[in-house]
Image: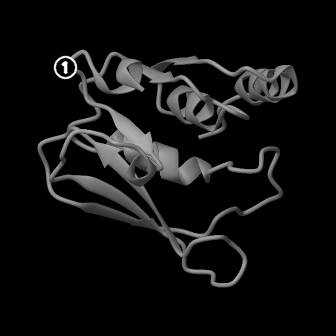
Amino acid sequence: MDLVVSGGNQSIVWGGNYFELAPSRCWLVWNKPERGFTLAEAELAWTNADSVVRVFDGNRHDTTTDHPTEKPLRLFKWCASLPWSRSATTILDPFCGSGTTLRAAKDLGRKAIGIEIEERYCEIAAKRCRQEVLF
C-alpha cells in the first residue's frame, strides 16, 4: 500500500477504512441511494488531500457490470474533477479491474496507467478504452 499513498502526490484509496493509513481530514464518501442491493449503503475512500469531506450521491450502475467491485464511471469522473485532483499529470490505478478509472481519464482527456493481475479484466479494460469518446 505504500506505493499508492506515498510520493507527495494526491492519492485516493477506495476502501481506505479497511487499511491502516495515515490520518486524513478529507474522506470521499460514495452514498448509494438504492438500498438492499449492496453490501454497504456507502463506501469510503481515504485521501491525503488537504480538503474537507466530499460526498458523491449516485446509484451503483446504470448498466450491467463486468467486475464484482466495479464502481460507476460517473464516480471516477467526479474524483478526477475534484479541484485538488486536476493538478495530477497522470492517474495511477494499481487495481484497475475492468478499467473504469482508465475510461474516466480518457473521457476527461487525462493520462492514466492501470495495473490488473487478471487477464480477463485487462481485456475488458482494453476494450472499454478503445471505445470512442462521444461527449
Residue 58 is situated, as x and y percent measured from the top left of the image, at 53, 68
Instruction: Name the residue: 24% across, 22% down.
Output: 9
> Residue lying furthest right in this view?
120
Residue 115 lies, with reference to residue 95, above or below; the image says above
> Residue lying furthest front in this view?
20
Q: State the residue position of label 1.
A: 8
Instruction: Name the residue: 41% across, 44% down.
Output: 19
Instruction: Name the residue: 84% across, 19% down.
Output: 119
| Viewer-proximal residue among 106 and 21 | 21
Residue 15 lies, with reference to residue 22, above or below; the image says below
| Viewer-proximal residue among 125 and 81 | 125
Q: Quadrant of residue 53?
A: bottom left
Instruction: Name the residue: 63% across, 38% down.
Output: 100
SS at badge 1:
loop
Number of numbered labels in the structure image = 1
Q: Quadrant of residue 11?
A: top left
Q: Amino acid at mark 1?
A: Gly
Residue 65 is situated, as x and y percent measured from the top left of the image, at 80, 52
Quarter of the N terminus within the rendering: top left
Categorize mark 1 by other alpha carbons within 10 Å: few (<14), some (14-19), many (20+).
few
Figure colour scheme: one colour
Quarter of the C terminus within the rendering: top right
Report the side of 55 relative to 87 (left or right).
Answer: right
Report the side of 98 relative to 11 (left or right).
Answer: right
Residue 67 is situated, as x and y percent measured from the top left of the image, at 78, 44
